[in-house]
Structures are given as C-alpha cells and as structure tokens.
Image (tube, rainbow, N blue to C red):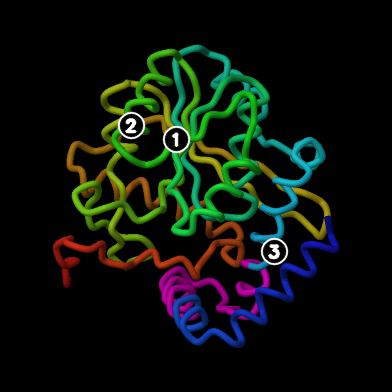
Amino acid sequence: MAAIQIIGAGTGVLVYLFSYKYRRRLYKNHQSAAHYSGFKSTPWRVAAESGMMFADTLWIWRHPKSSINKVTIENLDQVIELSKSGKGLIILASHFGGFEIVPRIFAEHTRATVMYRPARKRWVNELMLQSRKHTEIEFVEANLGGVRQIKRALIKGEVVGLLADQVPSVGDGVWAKFFNQYAYTTSFPIKLARQANVAILFVGAERLGLGKGWLIKSQLMNEAFPDCLVDACTEMNHYFEEMILSKPHQYMWSYNRYKRPAGAELAPTE
C-alpha cells in the first residue's frame, strides 16, 4: 500500500507540474482557503496528497477487505449504534483523505445506499461501479430515480451516503460560503433530513502515515439546520471546513468547487 501511495504522490506532482489548468485551480482554491483560515499554503504537498487520494481509491477497490483492516474509527460505539438503530442515518462526506472507504465502514454494520455522480466517460463509470461493488451497498445515480431510492432506504431505517461537496445541477442548490467564497452547494441533504427526520453524521477519512490506513472521524449534528436554506447550506459547509482544517492538505483542492452550473444565477458579489 505504501508503494502505491508513493507512486500516486509522484503522479500528483507531475500532473501539477505539467497541467496548467489543474495547477491554476488547485493553487487558487488552496491559496484562498489558506489565506482565509490561516493555515500554511503548501501547494506542492497538496498535489502529492491528491495523487495519494487517487492511489488510496485504487487500493480500496483492489483490496477491500485489507482496506477495512487498516481503518481506525473514533467514537466507534456511536457509529455502530447509529448504523444499527433502524431509524435511518444520513452520512455526509467530502473529497477528503480516503473518502472511498467511508461507505464500506457503515456497510460492516447495516445496508447502505450511496448516491454518486456518474463519470463522463462510460468505461470509467463501468470500472467505478464494478470496483465499488459490495453486497451491502447499493450505488444510485444522482437523478430523480436515485432520490427516490435514497428516500426509500431511509424509510426502511437504513444508512444513506452523499458526497455533499459536489456541485449540483442548477435548481438543486444555493450559493453558500465555503472557505469564504460562494460555492453552489447542494440543498438535497438539508431537504432530505427535514422530510425524513433522521440524524446527520459528518464523516471524514483522514489518511495516516504511508501504508498505515485511515482514521475515521465523525461529528453528529445535534441541532436542526436553520430554516433559511442558504443559512442551512452555509452551516453544512462549515462542518466540512472544520473537518478539512484538521488536515487541509488532504482535501481535493483541484476540484472545481466554485464553478457556476449552466443556467444558474450569478453568485452574490458581496
């Protein structure tokens, strides 16, 4: 595992070096967040860690059982209790660390339904689905059919998972601050929690040393989101910010988080 992470880190640096578009976006997003939050700006390390994130994903897909054995879980009793309560649970994660391992952790205790956004290239999407295949996890697309399946899973008292820092389609989100910049933010988790009246658990998979696996951190949302949808999405983003700030170099800063979806209104200027 350590070897593939080293290869991944080297690949990440090479992509950063030779792709202007990739380098510009990573540097801009990371630099802005570093300036706002006060952490040290280390774009070369971020590039390496982004490559390691890709390597982690490949390792988890190729060695699913070994990957589980390399996971340490904080608040394990709470995670198990929430997973097996039969009341339903919404898991919210971001592109942080070894995020690909998160659904498998909960599938150890209950059935999970995870929403994903299909890759643009068909062969990549097929590889992704085949590699993610798990008897206790159902992956559903981010469309109307997927929304219905997510809701049915919650009614059954199961766990559902979402990468809530993905940019939604127009009409499915609002402009909310993320590291002091307006990002078009999905409102689906907010609406889902209100309709289903279930708990929300924010989860991150912090990468440990080379070959040492991941530390699963979680934070239960104890209070309801504000009534205002923009305020609620801003608060959701703040939960992610707090988790990312524990290891800021492990976030996927190259992701186009601040893009404007086609047809969406302009972001506020203030």
Residue 40 magenta-highlighted: yes
Mark 1 lies on residue: 140
User: In what element is the residue under mark 1?
Assistant: strand
Viewed as shown, does residue 121 lie left or right of 75? left
* Count of numbered tags: 3
Task: Give the mark nearest the N terminus, 1 or 3.
Answer: 3
Q: What is the distance, in whole Å, between disc 2 and disc 3 at their CAs?
A: 33 Å
Q: Amino acid at mark 3?
A: Met
State the residue position of label 3: 52
Give the residue displayed 84% in from the left and 60% down from the top.
2
Residue type at tag 2: Gly
Give the class, few, some or many, for how many residues have Cα within 10 Å of label 3's Cα (few <14, many ≥20). Answer: many
Residue 56: percent from the left, percent from the top? 70, 55
Percent position of residue 45, x then y: 66, 75
User: Label 1 sits on what residue type?
Assistant: Val
Residue contact between numbered discs 2 and 1, judged by CB atoms under 8 Å: yes
Residue under the image location 60 percent in, 67 percent down: 249
| Image location of residue 89, percent across then percent down | 46, 25
Q: Is residue 102 left or right of residue 146?
A: right
Task: Say whether residue 264 is left or right of residue 261.
Answer: left
Quadrant (top left/top right/bottom left/bottom right) for the N terminus: bottom right
Which numbered mark, 2 or 3, is in the foreground of this view? 2
Q: Is residue 119 above or below residue 67?
A: below
**How far separated are the C-alphas under marks 1 and 3?**
26 Å
**Can you identify the residue that label 2 sits on?**
145
Identify the residue at the far left of this view.
265
Mark 2 or mark 3: whose residue is earlier in sequence: 3
The residue drawn where x is 44% and y is 35% is 140
- Secondary structure state at the residue bearing disc 2: helix
Magenta span covers which residues? 27-50
